[in-house]
Image (tube, rainbow, N blue to C red):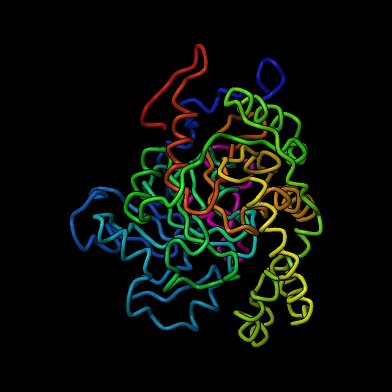
């Protein structure tokens, strides 16, 4: 902990954990097989010069990259797929903006996890907290960014798969408004919640990518809001730090009345769609998944169409309530409920931590809202993240708001514009 026994609310200012900037000392080829499935110099060159010329990208292994099969974090699945004939829409837009693809990076199996573990490829090391998990399911791209191997990690966020690794590794990240960026060429987990997102080490880079992938915002946040009951779902030190930031911002208290039934309904709909997408393949490859992901798919196989329809009705009402209560304000909340748990903590603790964090992250997913994560600070457990959730279509404005929050350094703390 800090000297006062809690995370410093102003540690977000210019925060870029020193470990996150260290290049990886890999094998003779510089390749870490826990992070990369394919890597090149570059793997795919830009198709034209543009605003992202000189920037490099790690692509999550859910996006189609022409000439390569999508692997979804599962060797057996990758072997069953044909090479893609064209790039996914988001990949093509990055290449057209001048970015180069350094490689295709691993994901948790079918992106159905938040830990960063992958039984076949291994769990990559979190550069900001090596004894702690990196977070998933955008684990490979996030670690590549945190190690300084690439500038941009192109990922997805269904239930927190951008927000959690960003928080755990001291990075910036955005989950975009649902369906604001096309998902053509993206292997789905649950289409009702899947969104395009990316992680970066610097807020300026996060904004530069947004300028290339997002059309102009359709709305602008007007002030900030905080739900104290939501903050209470996080560890006390993280909750206190988030409250301190919210107080400095003049955030207005609101009551979203978050119900645990919302998360239960979210899990039912997510599971039903995940089984519809991948159940047939899983049924013919019963030993392809690791136990934790296999357990989720086993539950998914039991969800009936009627149960999914009832849960969807409940989620539609919850989404309307969340959007109406939040209005045009930006919600300030913890990006994850805890710092990253220890790698060796075991599946029980990892699952408990996952569920605690899902109670926070599922709100933006249910309502299809954009969410920007920025570094909050760290204690002995590692980094934590602050999240801003806004109304649909406020993605770029949220990034600029986050940038303004991080622009004023804490008294006596170093500040680097590149870090923000």
Furthest toward the top, the residue is: 412
Q: Is residue 121 magenta?
A: yes
User: Can you give x and y, in whole percent of width and height, for residue 152 in the image?
Assistant: 39, 50
Quadrant of residue 334 within the rendered picture? top right
Predominant SS of the magenta segment:
loop
Q: On the picture, is 388 further left or further right than 7?
A: left
- Of residues 37 and 6, which is closer to you in this image? 6
Q: Is residue 258 magenta?
A: no
User: Can you give x and y, in whole percent of width and height, for residue 322 in the image?
Assistant: 67, 52
Q: Which residues are drawn in magenta?
A: 118-143
Quadrant of residue 383 within the rendered picture? top right
Q: How many marks?
A: 0
User: Can you give x and y, in whole percent of width and height, for residue 365 in the image?
Assistant: 62, 57
Identify the residue at image location x=74%, y=75%: 308
Identify the residue at image location x=37%, y=48%: 150
Identify the residue at image location x=70%, y=33%: 253
- Of residues 399 and 200, which is closer to you in this image? 399
Image quadrant containing the C terminus: top left
């Amino acid at each position: 902990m800090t000297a006062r026994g809690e995370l410093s609310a102003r540690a977000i200012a210019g925060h870029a954990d020193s470990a996150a900037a260290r290049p990886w000392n890999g094998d003779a080829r510089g390749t870490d097989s826990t992070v990369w499935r394919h890597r090149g110099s570059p793997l795919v060159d830009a198709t034209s010069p543009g605003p992202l010329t000189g920037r490099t990208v790690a692509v999550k292994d859910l996006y189609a990259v022409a000439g390569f099969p999508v692997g979804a974090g599962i060797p057996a699945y990758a072997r069953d797929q044909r090479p893609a004939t064209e790039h996914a829409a988001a990949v093509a837009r990055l290449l057209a903006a001048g970015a180069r693809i350094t490689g295709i990076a691993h994901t948790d199996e079918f992106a159905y996890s938040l830990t960063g573990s992958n039984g076949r490829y291994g769990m990559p090391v979190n550069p900001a907290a090596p004894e702690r998990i990196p977070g998933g399911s955008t684990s490979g791209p996030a670690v590549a960014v945190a190690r300084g191997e690439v500038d941009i990690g192109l990922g997805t966020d269904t239930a927190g798969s951008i927000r959690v690794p960003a928080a755990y590794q001291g990075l910036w990240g955005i989950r975009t408004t649902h369906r604001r960026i096309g998902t053509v060429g993206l292997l789905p987990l649950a289409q009702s919640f899947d969104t395009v997102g990316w992680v970066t080490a610097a807020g300026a880079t996060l904004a530069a990518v947004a300028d290339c992938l997002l059309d102009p915002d359709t709305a602008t946040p007007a002030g900030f809001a905080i739900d104290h009951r939501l903050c209470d779902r996080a560890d006390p030190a993280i909750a206190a730090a988030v409250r301190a930031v919210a107080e400095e911002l003049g955030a207005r208290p609101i009551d979203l009345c978050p119900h645990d039934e919302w998360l239960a309904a979210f899990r039912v709909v997510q599971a039903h769609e995940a089984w519809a997408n991948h159940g047939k393949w899983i049924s013919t490859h019963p030993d392809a998944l690791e136990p934790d992901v296999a357990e989720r798919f086993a539950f998914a196989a039991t969800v009936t169409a009627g149960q999914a329809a009832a849960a969807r009705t409940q989620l539609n009402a919850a989404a309307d309530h969340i959007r109406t209560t939040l209005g045009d304000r930006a919600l300030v909340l913890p990006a994850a409920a805890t710092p990253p748990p220890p790698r060796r903590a075991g599946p029980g603790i990892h699952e408990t931590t996952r569920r605690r964090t899902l109670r926070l992250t599922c709100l933006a997913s249910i309502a299809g809202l954009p969410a920007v994560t920025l570094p909050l600070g760290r204690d002995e457990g590692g980094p934590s993240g602050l999240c801003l959730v806004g109304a649909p279509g406020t993605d770029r404005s949220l990034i600029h708001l986050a940038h303004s929050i991080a622009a004023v350094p804490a008294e006596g703390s170093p500040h680097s514009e590149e870090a923000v």
